[in-house]
Image (cartoon, rainbow, N blue to C red):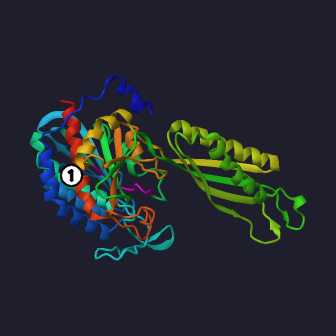
Amino acid sequence: MKKIIIPLLFTPFFTFGQSPLRGEIDESAAAIEGKVIEWRRDIHQNPELGNQEFRTAKKVADHLRSLGIEVTEEVAVTGVVGMLRGGHPGPTVGLRADMDALPVTERVDLPFKSTVTTTYNGQETGVMHACGHDTHVAMLMGVAEVLAGMKDELHGNVKFIFQPAEEGVFDADIFGAELMVKEGVMEDVDAIFGLHIWSQAEVGTIGYRSGPFLAAVDNLEITLTGTQAHGASPWSSVDPIVTSSQIVMGLQTILSRNVNISENPAVVTIGAIHGGIRHNIIPEKVEMIGTVRTFGMPQQELVHKRIMEITTNIAKSAGADADVRIGKLYPSTVNHPELTATMLPTLSAAAGEGNVILMDPVTGAEDFSFYQMEKPGFFMMLGGMKKGGDPTTTPSHHTPDFYIDEDAFVLGVRALSYLAVDYMEMQK
């Protein structure tokens, strides 16, 4: 995290500023609400998986060009980056939206329901915007139109980052935000903002958290090798099935005895165990896979260390060998504390007093974290559940019944636009 912290020791954020453009933003956001809904419905009906967002990327690029914004295409495979240069000198603010859909078959009865199908990882499946990235794209297209309409009044530049493959690509090692960063998208950005629609928070609200907000996500793979034997003579074996059972239980002590859960939660989940082929044979090998979720680098290092120690020592005590592999995917999404505190009044102005809500840590993950490792970043959750809805029964993200209330979009456009112009105002 040194990339974030050290420069800011010498470059404090400026005093609170309120852009005089807020009123104009309100009018423009309300005027294009219908467009944003139309864009979202079109993208929803034509979803594309990670690194395959060709149609979506063209729609975005064509729209940005129509606004006079400089456009770069094929960034990190299918990403689109637009640069809006303001009429006055100032910082460059990054705004990001992710574009990819998921291999999920939609069940929601909508006139713009997805009927797209594909083969994913060898299986036939539907394709659906089951996480809301279609709404992110449409809202950021709206922000581009709002801010382009006042570019001569902007004290700085806005970089619109339309990112592919946030959900990952099963046949690639580097993708999405990590690849965009590698290709230089953050080099001229001073601060970056992003949002995620949240199906279990009410329309009109914005959720946030300073510091670690969303979890780091890591893949866990364990291979246990013992000695095969007849099931009738287990004393002749080194049983990897019994050993794997002991390891599963042992790993749970990381959360109950090693992690300070009063500060942040953590998750170590074993999702699958594969071993053996017959009822009366103790196998030689067992393979286990799972996921690890942590908040912040110190916690991640602690949990990884304990996974290695517990697994290898339990295996050794049984006479088995353990091969443990932890593959790091996304770092924890960490909102820069000073930037968060500075911009909270902006969110309150956009959403209204009482509608900006401190959230608990979210054990889901977001590759927005890669941008935050380069420059100060602030990520928030935009309420997308109908007013009066019950979050305990509302379908969650990544499910066939996932649904978003379109009344949410105008606040998303206003919030991102406010953040951009207020950040510029603070640094004049």
Where does the image place residue 120, in percent across and percent down from the top left? 47, 68
**Who is closer to the viewer here, 168 or 109?**
109
Direction left: furthest residue? 152
Tell me if residue 165 is in the magenta stretch.
Answer: yes
Residue at point 10%, 40% (across, down): 153
Residue at point 36%, 62% (across, down): 52
Q: Is residue 74 visible?
A: yes
Where does the image place residue 200, in percent across and percent down from the top left? 40, 59
Image quarter (top left, top right, bottom left or bottom right) of the N terminus = top left
Where does the image place residue 198, in percent across and percent down from the top left? 37, 57
**Who is closer to the viewer here, 198 or 378?**
198
**Who is closer to the viewer here, 242 or 25?**
25
Q: Main secondary structure of the magenta part?
A: loop
SS for tag 1?
helix
Q: Is residue 183 visible?
A: no
Compared across the picture, whether 301 is left or right of 411 comes to right
Residue 304's place in the image compared with 4, above or below, is: below
Give the quadrant of residue 89. Answer: top left
Residue 292's place in the image compared with 202, above or below, is: above
Residue 224's place in the image compared with 274, above or below, is: above
Q: What residue span does the magenta drawing correspond to?
A: 161-168
Give the quadrant of residue 13. Answer: top left
**Who is closer to the viewer here, 354 or 141?**
354
- Name which residue type carries label 1: Val
Residue at point 59%, 47% (across, down): 326
Image quarter (top left, top right, bottom left or bottom right) of the C terminus = top left
| Mark 1 crowd level (few <14, some 14–19, many ≥20, 10 Å Cα) | many
Q: What residue sits right under mark 1 in the picture?
A: 143
Tell me if residue 162 is in the magenta stretch.
Answer: yes
Compared across the picture, whether 397 is left or right of 328 comes to left
Where does the image place residue 374, in percent across and percent down from the top left? 38, 37
